[in-house]
Image (tube, coloured by chain):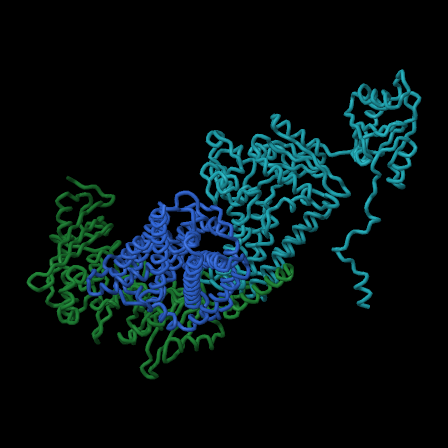
Chain colours: A cyan, B blue, C green
Amino acid sequence: MFDKWKKSKINLSDPVIEEDIEEIPEGIHKQLRENIIAFRELFGESFDLVIKNTQVNGIKAAFIVLDGMYDNLLVSSAVIAPVLEMKFGTTEPQMIYDHINEYRASECDTKEAITMQDAVQNLLSGCILLLIDGVPKCLAFSVQGYPKRSIDQPESEAQEFGSHEGFVDMYKDNVTLVRRRIKSPYVRFETLTAGETSHTTLCVCYHAKRADPVIVNDVKSKLKNMQLDIVPGAGAVRPFLEAKGLSFFTSVGLTERPDVFAAKLAEGRIGIIVDGTPYALIVPYLFVENFHSLDDYLSRPYYTLIARLLKIICFFAAVFLPGIYVAVGTFHQEIFPSDVIFEIASSLQGTPFPLVLESLVIHFIYEIVREAGLRMPKSMGHAVSIVGALVIGDAAVTAGLISAPMLIIVAITAICSAVISPLHQASSVLRMVFIIVGGMAGLYGIMLGFGIVAVNLCSVSSFGVPFTSPISPFDRYASRDSLLFAGWKKVGKRFIQVQKLRGSDSDANKS
Amino acid sequence: MPTKANITPFQFYTLLFLSRTFSLVAYIANMRAQLSSSETLVGSLLMGIFLLLTSLPTLWLMKKDANSSILTRASCLSAVYEKIICLIYLVDFFFYGIMTATRFELFASSVMFPETDMSFVMLTLLAASAYAGYKGIEALGRSAVIFLLPVLLVFVFVFCSLLGDFDFLNFTPFTTKNLAETVDSGLYTCAQTHELIAVGILLPFVKEQKRKSLPVWILLVTGIIFLTNLMLSGILGSFSTTQLFGMYSLSVLAEFGFVERMDSIITCVWMICALVKLAYIFFLCDYLLTSLFGKEKKVLYLLLSVAVIFTGMLALSRSIFHFSQVVTSPLSIILYLVSAVGVPLSVVLAEKIKGRKQDEKA
Amino acid sequence: MKKLSLLLLPLAVLLLFSSCAAGETELKNRLIIEGIGVDWDEKEEQYALTVQVLVTALSNGKENTAETPVANYTVRGKTIAEAINELCDTTGKNPLYSQNRIIILGSSLSDDKTIRALDYFAREYTARADVYVAAASGKASDILQVAGSGGEITAKIIEQSILESYQNSISVNTELFNVINLHLEDTTAFTMPLLEVDADRNGKEKSVKVTGTYVHTNGENENRLSSQETMFFLLMTDKAEKGTFSIESDGTAAGLDIIKASSKIDVEVKDGVPHYTIRVRCTADMLEFDTPQFGNFTAEDMKKIEAAAESTLKEGIEALLTRQLKEEKCDIFRFGRRLMQKEPTFYERVKDEWESYLPKITYTVSVSVTIRRIGQETMIR
């Protein structure tokens, strides 16, 4: 039985079975009929492949398009009508082709596809192809008209004073949003494809005069060498750009806001817009940026200082507070103030479980409620709120299963966790780790864990820039926009280039 | 071994400062000799003077070439000489690692977890330190700067909150009755500052003006030790002589308003210093072993270092009596003088002699 | 291999750290000690400890009371450690010393036993060196078991009383580390606040009162300072924060409230005898001027009152010095320490006979009192 299981087991290191690889013919045939057959074979029984045979100036031709991907009006007025109504003196196919390419269909973007691969890519991108019998090439007209989301407020990065425009799923629209905000010819938008099946377009963006060409080339090379079958979102590209070594914190930034994206490009960073997702990636990314938001730059500096300090405190509370409470309750009871210890001891008296277990369970339940809130249909929202609040909040305490102080700790932790949403995932995991460590070794274990996490953080470099910059290594000028914001009058005097921060590779080479 | 200069002098000396701070907070008073408060203070000042004097060979070394490690320069003289120096330093840092681990074990088993077997906790600490050492001097330097703030805050909190209890009557007048013991105390405390030995080895990793920063670092270390002894004597008086870890006793008393009984938190912060100290010792052991054997096998060397230090710690910490025997012996002073003074001096002198011979030939 | 080590590492860490949790207990399983009273049982020749602990009620179905409920346990043992062990056996819980507010030493403890009793608390790693230490005029157990209004008086109230008494210069304020520090000085006698059970006229309602200062002596004599003497003691040793005293001048009395006080003690050896110069400076507000008329306070009255206050304080300090140095032969003022700092060679000669040397000591006391405010009533020039 086990032998059979062993034989049938798929070995991940084995090469993929050849039948799975799509085989696209290399070149476009001269004969129209053969091309049509090739397309039909390639797309199989797909209903959306539309092939319209026609004649152009007496020569056989065919329009090929994918149903639902084109704009009806645009196709009719910009492509089909001009091409079919064409009256040209010659019936030479190549000349007809050239004439159409140069003079017809001027209302839309026209590309030439020499290989079948290019033709298929254009077709899949929503273009309409024109094949002429006798010409081993085809023309692709950009007549995309597929349904897409309109520009709306970014959902994950709400700001008080910032723009209400967020990225959408189409990379071209996103590029337009960025172009509008940074009107410089030096800002480059270079595309490449990723995903062996999905052929997703990635747009690498950078300011040619400010970005480090070494980093730009490094990013491009990493993207080109990505081994991905499908790119479902920006998050799938992220791991390929992250720094080496294990870390709880990502060294690749993510944003949904074009204004933030543009600002980062102006600092010499490289942005990657992924087609099909409203999130863009930014590298290099620093740890302090998790505590920054656009509103910081649009508010008064004194308020920005408070806001950032608040976020840092919330981060530490979200990660360490439950662990510290468990540690203090288990090992270091002397820390409780004399007037409070009676209340806490009384509330803990009736609970059956150790503090560690209580804490882990209640945080686990909180994660369940949070996850349910994210995934569930809106109509069920009220039911989950009631269950979460009443059952966990009230009934569990009344029944004596958990203590009231623990519930307060969870509530504070949950709210603090929401304040620093970029670090939510890391803080959720670290919290559990520190609860266990606190329950096992008290504050000493927590401090040791903090030390290890800090050393780990300090060892990370995002494309040669230290992750903990500009705090450590301390960069005097850049620190004006780290924990505090010194105001635009000071910060605006000189732009910061992230790759030139103290301790970065370029800084080391300079010295 | 990559030797690109990648940490600033501030990061480097902060790392060494934190490392020295641990020796300060885990210092067991009066193990070598019963000294009065004023004798301890004079001993602190003498320590500073001895430290400055013993740093002269290192400064002389840096004067000629501040970017090459002492090992590299020794190898230019003779490959065998380099290996001998490597071995001396390795023995040194194993010894300091064992002493540090033992001190921490004694500290932890006296005030942190007295009812628990500390072997496993120590092993975890050593493993964590080895991991930190594995991450390299850059990570250590950067994290040292981050750790500096809470460490300094803790000192400020302890000292400021207890200023009200400071009483000049707790001090004793300085007499020459115990002059020999006072000088010995100064010398021994100086020998605890083995970070000076690391300066010569880690020079290539540090960029910019490292030579000027060394005397400043020595002054700061002397300052903090003097200030600590001053506060210990001024606040605890003779009570400090009855306590195993004076600084811990001081932290027990520190309170401000409703913020009281913070000794656990204060001790935790000091524990970071232990982590930093052991981490840089592990890094150095790895560096020295790589230089000795010529092959880079980081994980193996770190495991070996952990094993040696852990075994040594187990042997020494079995009872405080064993530890006191090592403390009271002249071993640490001899090791320090050989490594901090003898070796750099010999390298510099040998280079001078070699230079003169080459000039004569030319 | 990497995945295996990633899996094993957290398990190993958990296992390693679990050894720390083995010896520790959670707050709900700890006996929170509020106060400890130490007496000596002559009959059984062992320590009798009265330990006041917090009774943590169940959080469900219990009403909150105004006072924190406590319970007193009496345990015995040849050593303090043995007695505490009996407490663990009785209650089944591990004691938590860190919340201990006060250690009360009963009068049944001889001076020698007092020091021995304190050794446990100085050595025990959870017992804190900043815990207050006080002496009971009778039994320490009586102090802790006195019933107040609405329940037993907790150690918290005693602690607050000691603090307030110290602030009002009625008693000294001594923490454990201070007691040991002073005891280690060869020549100094340490002091502690003195607690007494005070009953009302009917003898029913009892309370704990801080009545002055206990002085530790090596002999059999009981050396106590009254609250007035304590004020003089604190004034001359630069430890007085506040205090109230009355003076009389030409048949008129006045009440003064000390706002600020400082003192300086200098020592010099004159003709082979240490001479101490004590300078006390005091700023006081007038609380009361005992005359039949209102609003007739003059500048001359103020000068008279200042002079009277100076002479009152001076006489009080001199009387205290006479009693302590000549009669009780107790150096509570750390004169020996000051001599050691100033004249170490001379000190070395006399330190072994310091007690018998004390009556020879000479001193000069000078007091300066300034009346800062006279209250709401005006002053006629």
Residue B206 x/y as whole percent: 44, 47
- Where C76 falls versus C374 (above or below)? below
The total number of labels drawn is: 0
Left-right relation of A367 to A308 = right
Q: Nearer the viewer, residue B294 or B14?
A: B294
Percent of width and height locating residue A386: 67, 51
The residue at the far left in this view is C271
| Residue B40 visible in image | yes
| Quadrant where the N terminus of chain C is found in the figure | bottom right
Query: Could you tell me residue C78's position as x and y percent?
Result: 36, 80
**What is the x, y in percent for residue A53?**
92, 29
Establish if A386 lies above or below A475. Answer: below
Quadrant containing the C terminus of chain C in the rendered view: top left
Residue A87 in which image quadrant: top right
Rendering quarter of residue B230: bottom left
* Residue found at the far front of this picture: B361
Nearer the observer, C147 or B82? B82
Q: Is residue A32 above or below residue B233?
A: above
Judge from the rendering whether residue B247 lies leftward or rightward of residue C314; answer left or right: right
| Residue positioned most to the bottom | C43
User: Taking C233 as reference, is A481 left or right?
Assistant: right
Which residue sits at x=62%, y=36%?
A: A271
Determine if residue C167 is in view.
no
